[in-house]
Amino acid sequence: MVRVMIETSYDPPFTEEDWDASNVKLFPCLEERQVQWIRSFVSPDHRRTICEFEAPDAEALRAAYRRVGVPFDRIWVAEVREP
């Protein structure tokens, strides 16, 4: 398993309802692909997010997001470095 980051931009900014609706569609598809959501970083204006996942590879996330039609800008594998 690797850490995978997903960056997304929103115009107009997303609402909490938008966020919840996307997750309802997305999470079952992630589970099928053995992808686990870790956390999301959200800009105060709700125009950008970076979400962190643990997944077999980046393609598992790309496939899940594309399958349910949830947009994204970039998906990339990351190394975790902590103090």
Image (cartoon, rainbow, N blue to C red):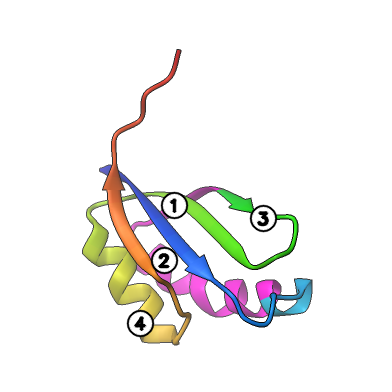
Separation of marks 3 and 1 at Cα, in angstroms: 22 Å
Could you tell me the amino acid type at mark 1? Gln
Q: Pointers 1 and 2 in contact (CB under 8 A)?
A: yes
Q: Residues within 10 Å of mark 4 (few under 14, many from 20)?
A: few
Q: Pointers 3 and 1 in contact (CB under 8 A)?
A: no
SS state under label 1: strand
Give the labeled residue for mark 1. Answer: 36
Give the labeled residue for mark 3. Answer: 43
Give the labeled residue for mark 2. Answer: 30
Dividing the picture into quadrants, the one containing residue 43 is bottom right
Could you tell me the amino acid type at mark 4? Arg
| Residue 7 horizontal/vertical position (percent) | 45, 61
Separation of marks 2 and 4 at Cα, in angstroms: 11 Å
| Residue 8 horizontal/vertical position (percent) | 49, 67
Mark with earlier residue (1, 4): 1
Is 55 placed left or right of 50 in the picture?
A: left
Q: Is residue 51 above or below residue 46?
A: above
- Residue found at x 25% / y 59%: 58
